[in-house]
Image (cartoon, rainbow, N blue to C red):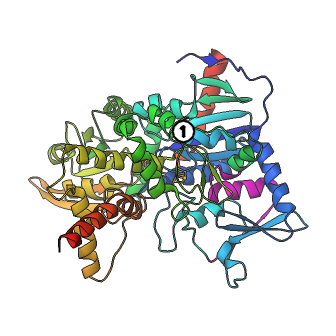
Amino acid sequence: MSETSPDTSVEVTNVAVASRVAFAAWVDEALDVRTFGQVLIRPSASGAYCLRHRDDAEAVNLTFYDKPWDAREIARLTESGQHRPLKSSPNLRRGWELRVSGTVALAVAMNYLYPAGIVHWYLYREGQLRITNYRENAARQSGIYKRVQHLSDEGVQNAAKACCEDAVCLKKTLWDVDPETTLEIDRGEGEIPCPEPCSVFVSFARRIRLFERETKRGLDAAGFSLSEKEDLAALVEAGAAGVIRLAREAEFEEPLNERRLRYRKLTLLPKLRTAQDASSHEC
Amino acid sequence: MKALVIVGHGSHLSGDSSLPVFEHARRIRERYAEEYDEVVECFWKEEPSMRHVLDTVEAQDVYVVPAFISEGYFTQQVIPRELDLAGPVTCKGGKTVRYAGPLGTFEGMADVIMERAEDLLRHKRIRPGRWGLVLIGHGTDLNKSSGGVIYLNADRIKRRNVYDIVEVGFLDQDPGIGDVVGNIEAENIVLIPVFIAEGWHTRETIPEDLALTGEVTVKPSPSGYKTIFYGAPVGTHPSMADLIASRARETEVVRNVS
Ligand code: SF4
């Protein structure tokens, strides 16, 4: 590595400052409240901001916090106490109110609730958000993630449908497979843009690539892969026991992971339906 | 304005890995409020990602310290690539970003290990006999220097003459911790994992491999009894926050000299 690199930029805007100011102004301009992800922000004339879960708009008896860093504690675990590796998952816990004063404190709090959310929101509004498509991101990966470079276009599409839609992630997916191949998914309605596949997505893409390899190596006589059968067996077992307890959010090696099941819905369910149709015609 | 950015590994599955980074960031905010206007965390497997963290920093002078023990794949490849760093000092986007080395090789690391051991022994019943310290490292082929850093710290501690014996044991390479702890000629053995965070190894593998029953395990031995004191990983010790701050400060010295 060289000692120093030249700064080639001519005039540079400090995007952190600009986004903090623009975000606070956007909140201040609200007639009543703003919603950002699952967070409701209510400005006050004194320059303070009151943050709550959007489903707690009218709630009483909330736990009160007053330091911007408390937002980390709020964002750390789900309602049931699970780790939240992806803060844009729609699983922010309820029952709290955070009051902060001034734009710096608001930005600190927002960056714990939705890391880098306001800077991406700002850059997107200004038409300056740099988008990194899937292939560019995959080309950068190394180590155990290098294999995501071989994921097919169809694999990327299905992985994104399973991993990025609003049911599992509230960000608006802005990236594509590559400059020529548009991502054909419901990109989401939220305020927070997603400019590049995140680390949870890359890890999911790795799992999907392993499924693709499994398929290439051969399916059974009925056209199913070993892992597809394992997942079905796990579902039947859990259902029969009366509790389908989902695996942790990014535990993609587990059959009962929500994103993995969403992927199965896209790829396995059509196969099962076709098999069912074929056998009913035979009768 | 100055900002300190602490880079952690993070995990998709558990909050254990990122917790010390958040805790040290909080301590640095409290202890070094005069020095840093901003202290932020970023991760490989959690958010904010390294990719995006610098855009959230307002200060022009940014100090990046990796919360990693040894030099290797992460500190040499992943972190510079994801933060888009060109070297020890990078000027970009109106910011000067200084990149510090990992924590394990830093002078102060041995002090933190000693403190961890002292904390562990405080208010414990101590039997007479020789004292042995075993530093536990991961030791993996992926990271060739991970073993070296453990030996380096063992040598530094040996020179202080506090322990009769100072040894090194690994989970994934020789000498294995089982053999080291089994053969060490001391009646009191202090085990300190030289890891950044609690996790599967510190909670399960090490206690299981060594048949530990908690912080203190007393076992019969040919010469009577052996007492094993098992410490928490060095990376979670509150003094690591000071080590991170010193590591950041050191990047200025390097720059001024160069
Ligand atoms: S890559 Fe997908 S899952 Fe990850 S943040 Fe973006 S939209 Fe959400």
Where is residue A45? Give x, y as percent.
91, 67
Q: How many marks?
A: 1
Looking at the picture, which amino acid does disc 1 mark?
Answer: Asn
Q: Is residue A141 left or right of residue B220?
A: right
From the image, tell me which residue sits under label 1.
Answer: A133
The structure residue drawn at horizontal position 32% and vertical position 29%, both measured from the top left corner, is: B144
Where is residue A251? Give x, y as percent.
37, 58
Closer-to-camera residue (B163/A169): A169
The structure residue drawn at horizontal position 27% and vertical position 68%, both measured from the top left corner, is: A277
The structure residue drawn at horizontal position 23% and vertical position 66%, both measured from the top left corner, is: A278
Circle 1 SS class? loop
Residue B115: tell me if it is visible. no
For disc 1, the neighbor class at 10 Å (few under 14, some 14 to 19, many from 20) is many
- Stretch in magenta: A95-118
Residue B61: tell me if it is visible. yes
Check the picture and name the quadrant holding the C terminus of chain A. Answer: bottom left
Q: Is residue A205 above or below residue B207?
A: above
Where is residue A255? Give x, y as percent.
30, 63
The chain identifier of the residue carrying mark 1 reads A
> Is ligand 1 within 8 Å of the beta carbon of the residue shown at mark 1?
no
Query: On the image, which quarter does residue A187 sit in?
Result: bottom right
The structure residue drawn at horizontal position 39% and vertical position 32%, both measured from the top left corner, is: B156
The answer to whether residue A15 is magenta is no
The answer to whether residue A102 is magenta is yes
Query: On the image, which quarter does residue B216 sit in?
Result: bottom left
